[in-house]
Amino acid sequence: MKLVLTFFLLIPFTIFAQPTNDIKKLKETIHELAKEVMSDKKEFSLDFTLSLDEQKIVSKAFDKTISEIEVLKEFKTYQKYTSEKYTDLKESSFILSEFISFDTITYKSRGMPYLDILLLFKGTRDKYSNRAGNSDTIRIATKFVIINNKIKIDGSIYSTSIFYHDLDQLNLVKNTHTEFVVRKYKNYYETSEDGVIPIRNKNKWGLVSLNNNKMLLPAIYDSIFPFYDGFARVVINGGHNLIGRNLKPVFSENKVRIKLIDGIYLIADKNGKYQSLLDLGINSETAYIPLPEKITNSGEKQDLNINKPLRERLAHEYYKSAPYKMVQTQRYGQSFCYVINKINGDTLSSFHGFEFIDSHGDYLFGRRNDSSFVMKPDGKILFKNNNVCKIESPGYVIVYDKGKRLFGIYCPYTNIYIKPIYYYIEPIDRDRFFVVITKKGKIGYLNTSGKELFDTL
């Protein structure tokens, strides 16, 4: 009797034991996931895959009107795709011998919580190699949706390099932060063509000159909106007004409300009746602040196509054809890259040992030994950084601290480096000024040298 009793007591913990899958026990859950990946199983565990009911939750989060038939179709596609990805992973040439550690990042998409997990293993990258030992670090990237405190694979599971994983994480965090900025700060200064930069002091806003940082408008306003058609909306002590390019109030008395709808300013009187500026006999031919000087890659003045926004002109310059070409070869087991003058065929410079190198506008961007580089075509190194970096149009480098998940920037055209201490950073018109979101979630601006134009936020 005791033997029978003992046998039944062991059943729940052995034969019918279920793998841990609980977001509240994340460490144990990820260890179960690692065991799953290291196993000889050809199919991914059902405990980590979506059920039909869970697929319905995910599908309806993306499309509330989706039918039951369409949900079933998506579920079958999901099962097939997940199975194929897992099979591809199992048929890879590496051998996993030991689970080392993991990295995670959480975010939301269409209201659904997601969790990306990077699993790190020791093993052999090529099982067909004669090289002995398990000295390789192998990274497996996975993407899960969180449903009812469980993680369910979203189809993605693949081996990756640290370089591309870091770039994926950078893009994911950057996009998440950008969505926050767009949602919370819909109206922020994103052009230098008005010649001014907002400054914040003691929770009040003013304006300084773009060219010399001279205070043009004292920080007395609760809000200052970007200029449009020669005017900027301001809020002061609960009242609304407009300022022209002479930075003086348009109305002698503040208004109850001012709206900008379809490019037309509408002004409400005390009775709530709205009138346009034309109705009030006001046009945009007010005192004028000159536009900043046009700039080129070299910083020289040049009359560009003034009918296009400066940002668009700079992007066009950035993507112009470079006067050099790059030739990449393999020698003695190492990768070499030569920069060749297109006109006379002379070799301008050569690089070796880079896992990644490419041309971007007037500069080269590469990565070697977990460091990122920005270089001139002649080989001169302008910038080296051990954080995750990514080059963007029209010529700046995002610098991402993946430990703190904060952003900085390097600008090769102006040789400005701003350390990764911000939740969000965006250069305006190739480094004329910068928009940032601080770690406390407050918006602020930096001048062209990177100096903060705000008090403690």
Image (spheres, helix red, strand yellow):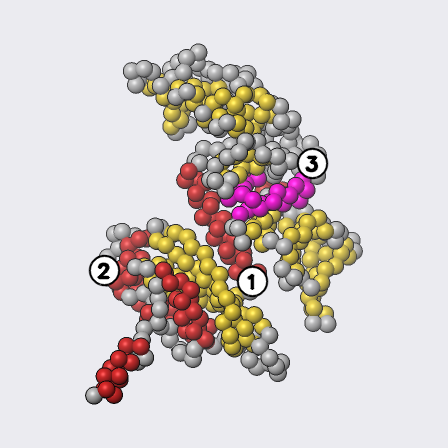
User: Could you tell me the amino acid type at mark 3?
Assistant: Gly
Q: Earlier in the sequence, mark 2 or mark 1?
A: 2
Badge 2 is on which residue? 68
Q: Is residue 327 left or right of residue 225?
A: right
Which is nearer the eye, 118 or 255? 118
Of all residues shown, which one is farthest toward the left? 1
Badge 3 is on which residue? 299
For residue 291, which numbered disc appears in the image? none
Q: Is residue 257 visible?
A: yes
**Residue 424 inside the magenta-drawn segment:** yes
Q: Is residue 138 left or right of residue 149?
A: right
**Residue 245's x, y, as percent?**
53, 20
Which is nearer the eye, 360 or 53? 53
Magenta stretch, main secondary structure class:
strand
Badge 1 is on which residue? 162
Give the Cα distance between marks 1 and 3: 37 Å
Of all residues shown, which one is farthest toward the top? 252
Q: In the rendered structure, which segment of residues is drawn in magenta? A: 406-428
